[in-house]
Image (spheres, rainbow, N blue to C red):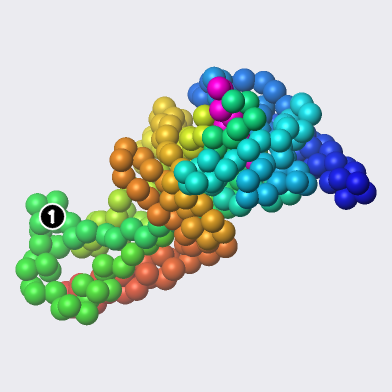
Amino acid sequence: MRNKYLTLIFCSLSLVLLVAGCKRADNGVDMTEGEPEKEFVVKNDSMVYGLTCDGTSDSVIVLWPFGGDPIVLNCVDAKHAGRVIGKPEIGDWTGVMINPEDTTEAMMVLNLDQLKGTWTYPVMPVMKDLQHMSKRMQRRMMANMPDSVKETFLVPREYGFTLKRSHKAQPVGRIMRSNTLEDDSPVQYPEVKNYKQWYMCNGRLLLVSGEMRKSGATDGKESPDVVDTLDFVFMDTDSLVLLKGGKRYSFHRKQNAMKANEAAVKAAEKQEAASDRLKPKK
């Protein structure tokens, strides 16, 4: 009994801290007001949010919803169906999809505290088409570039996103390089999405991105936001699998965005050095 009272006090304190740390989001996503983190939830979202409490096991989830009393939900079928995403931990911010036909059953359980952090996946560059290269670069490419140099350029980078508190997000993989260096490079990487915010809706992850205008724009305004909707397939401590448009994306957890970008920066430095070696000597 004493442990249950301690858990109740712990959940209450966690709820107060969440309330104190939240701010309203201002963006193009249709929002609704509510308690703590639910203040940021998209309208028409049926997921119930709260804190995982004592008594949670492989077959039962005990959730203290924001603004409600603790509820006990059976999650056996959800577990067997692979719909328990992450491991429920006492005190963690958790989202649950409840069966509308049986309010004692959880159809999906998602540990949102475990979801927060930096997630990346490897991206390979591609050799630029000759028609898109400058005449100078075409001559270089036609001069039988050594395999060792090609290996220097064909270096993977880590792309992804960091999900933070208050539903803030930031991109991973953006490397600042001058236009001249980009033009001289024989390879091209995919564009990095400028992730800004993240939300949940009915058990799906919504990633909001908005690219800055191209260089030359003086007003600093951003283009309209784009919302990517992704389904959860799997998540544990170090791995995350999401589904978008029938395609699976496998992510690995990184310590932070800076660490994830360190390797890309070093690779970019090697590529710049290789570009210098390719330049014709005067």
Tell me the residue that label 1 is attached to. Answer: 129
Residue nearest the observer in this picture, 162 or 53? 53
- Residue 212 counted in the magenta span: no
Against 208, residue 181 (above or below) is below
Against 265, residue 116 (above or below) is above
How far from the left and from the top, in percent, is residue 246?
A: 30, 40
How far from the left and from the top, in percent, is residue 274?
A: 27, 74
Number of labels in the image equals 1
Residue nearest the observer in this picture, 121 or 94? 94
Q: Quadrant of residue 103?
A: top right
Element type where label 1 sits in the image:
loop
- Tell me if 185 is positioned left or right of 199 in this view: left
The residue depicted at 29 percent of the width and 55 percent of the height is: 189
How far from the left and from the top, in percent, is residue 17?
A: 80, 40
| Whether residue 80 is visible | yes
The residue depicted at 50 percent of the width and 43 percent of the height is: 83
Dominant SS in magenta: strand
Q: Which residues are magenta?
A: 93-101
Against 244, residue 119 (above or below) is below
The residue depicted at 14 percent of the width and 63 percent of the height is: 137
How far from the left and from the top, in percent, is residue 2?
A: 93, 49
Task: Classify 10 Å Cα crowding around label 1: few (below 14), some (14-19), many (20 and above).
Answer: few
List the single residue furthest toward the right: 2
The residue depicted at 53 percent of the width and 40 percent of the height is: 77
Q: Quadrant of residue 270?
A: bottom left
- Tell me if 150 is positioned left or right of 55 in this view: left
